[in-house]
Image: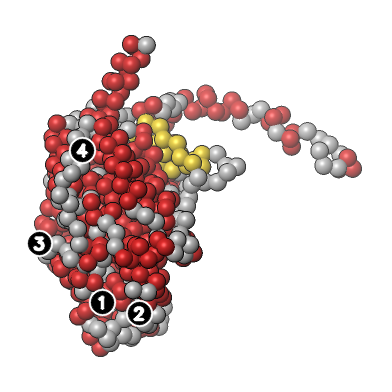
Amino acid sequence: MTIKEALFQYTLRQGDTSLILGHRLSEWCGHGPKLEQDIALINIALDLVGQSRSYLEYAARIEDKNRTEDDLAYHRAEREFKNLLLVEQPNGNWGNTIMRSFYYDVFHYLFLHELVKSKDEQIAAIAQKSLKEVTYHLKHNSDWVIRLGDGTEESHVIMQTAADELWMFTGEMFDMDEVDDILMKEGIAPDLKPLHSKWLQKVKDVFTEATLKVPPEDAWMQSGGKLKGIHSEQMGFILSEMQYLPRAYPDATW
Amino acid sequence: MSKPKSKNEWPLWEVFIRSKAGLSHKHVGSVHAADHEMAIENARDVYTRRSEGISIWVVESNQVHANNPAEKDSLFEPADDKIYRHPTFYEIPDEVGHI
Amino acid sequence: MSKEKAFEQEFENKIENEIKIEPRDWMPEKYRENLIRQISQHAHSEVVGMLPEANWITRAPSLRRKVALLAKVQDEAGHGLYLYSATETLGARREDTVDDLHEGRAKYSNIFNYPSVTWADIGVIGWLVDGAAIQNQVMLTRTSYGPYSRAMVRICKEESFHQRQGYEIVLHMAKGTPEQKEMAQDALNRWWWPSLMMFGPSDKDSKHSQQSLAWKIKRQGNDELRQEFIDKTVPQAKYAGLTIPDPDLKWNEEKGVHDFGEIDWSEFMNVIKGNGPMNRSRIKARKAAKENGAWVREAATAYHEKKMKRAQQKQSAA
């Protein structure tokens, strides 16, 4: 694998994860528990789709095959998407949505902190911009995990259930392969292994305040989305919704 | 003006935004929130989507005290005839220049 | 002169002299009621209006269109909040006005009882529905009630991108493939008449219009606003190469305005009564959002109370 190929894959992984999480959060639009929260969630979705556009636009340039950000978003199939399994999980109730974002935000924050040092200027610039946004996402969602975890008995149960159910999708965030190895040697990508303990510590801190139990650290973890493009059944539904217009009218532009 | 609230209703907060350094905070509207941190976040998302602010104050609405509007005349009218508080009250010959 | 009479006189003087009425000023009870009805109805329209468009966010055909639509629908939530915030200054709590909506006691703009069937609808909603709304809202920036007027100024400023966003979509489709053009024309056919109905019945048949005009809550009549909207929109349709579905529409040289066909008010009345294709679905969606979110709102309140209690205990222990 060449550096260029690795960089293309790597950029897709970030872009796809942002895009799919942004897609999921948009599904809440008009249905949130309070109008103020609809607005908050859309803000986060806008940040994520914005990040995704930067990554995909860059990926298209790296690939150099005359494709655009939209070609990458709208004309790739399930197996070509390299997002984390975590972010494609259905919204469920508001608690599931908050917990899914929280698990990812902690990782995303730590990851971007390293990515800003990337020797690839474009990647570093995207990371720099994203870090400000994600710092807010993390604060916002940590606050919500605490409120709902330590709120009522009902909310506590909902949040604990969400924490437990989504747990098996958290390990994948730290998976690495040849793509990472090649780019680490070039100083473009960070090593994800050291982030794991930091991630766990932050989750523990917030869960302690939220009176939630951290699921067992040695639990079995799912993987395959980010590295191999093997997704859950959810993915096909997301794409058939997201891509339907450009696929149904291939000659049209919008 | 506030009525008793049922259990799951969040209180009303008045929002004040400083649009840029050098200007005062200005009242822009209100949000609902369970606590002041949420109120600030909600105010940020509702009232600064287009870079309208660099600083936010929130105050729970029931903590805002106002004068009785019926006392408007006795509170504010007495100032109307104190024209000696304004520079134009004083006559300075033009030759002196700007003072 | 009785105290009440003196207040009333002062109120009338303010209206006469274009001095805004502010929240704690004396105002006739009917003026307050009228405002609460109109502003909350306006707020509900923003919020219910999110639904037909939010439907398409996950299906927006390009990422550029997706962020624009997200931002637009988010603005609508924001505008709903600015308006609820204005009704709260009149002592009407948001929870109560929202309950009125959910129980069918309050109305919202009838237009949102029609379905957004294709992507072209997103374009036409922005172009016509926001266009008609802006027509109305620009007039309302001069309304006599201060908080309403300030909310409107802000809303008008923000909405200027909404209509452009919609017209850009329409134009792009109208100049696109034959299928796209057909979609755009079809959307215009379906939304044209309901958009004209947005201005409400003719002034002579509108029960609220006269009083609202006298109190300067509204500054222009329904018919005048509708006419201005038509005159503005006709050239835009022409530029896009689309046909407005009204055989009677033609330029009246003498009056300097467009003549247009008879509006089918029986359809309007029926949709208002709940017989539109989407009435039930819209209210159901809003009620479900409220009910499914009850545990979240309760939990946040409970957490805040716990936190206050802990702080107090800490203080008294110290």
- Rendering coords of residue C264 (x, y %): 18, 71
Q: Say whether mark 2 and mark 4 are on the same chain.
A: yes
Residue assigned mark 4: A214
**Tell me, what colour scheme is on the image?**
secondary structure
- SS of the residue under disc 4: loop
Residue assigned mark 2: A67
Q: Nearer the viewer, residue B45 or A164?
A: A164
* Residue at left offset 48%, top offset 50%: B52
Q: Say whether mark 2 and mark 3 are on the same chain.
A: no
Mark 1–mark 2 CB contact (< 8 Å):
yes
- Rendering coords of residue B95 (x, y %): 89, 42
Q: Chain of mark 1?
A: A
State which mark lies toward you, 4 or 2. 4
- SS of the residue under disc 3: helix
The alpha-carbon separation of the residues under discs 3 and 1 comes to 40 Å
The residue furthest top is C317
Kind of residue at badge 4: Val
Q: Say whether mark 2 and mark 1 are on the same chain.
A: yes
- Rendering coords of residue C170 (x, y %): 32, 77
Which of the 4 image quarters holds residue B58?
top left
Quarter containing the N terminus of chain A: bottom left
Residue assigned mark 1: A75
- Rendering coords of residue B36 (x, y %): 36, 33
Mark 4–mark 2 CB contact (< 8 Å):
no
Residue assigned mark 3: C275
Q: Is residue C234 above or below residue A89?
A: below
Q: Nearer the viewer, residue C178 or A210?
A: A210
Residue C290 seen from this side: no
Neighbours of disc 1 within 10 Å: few (<14), some (14-19), many (20+) = some
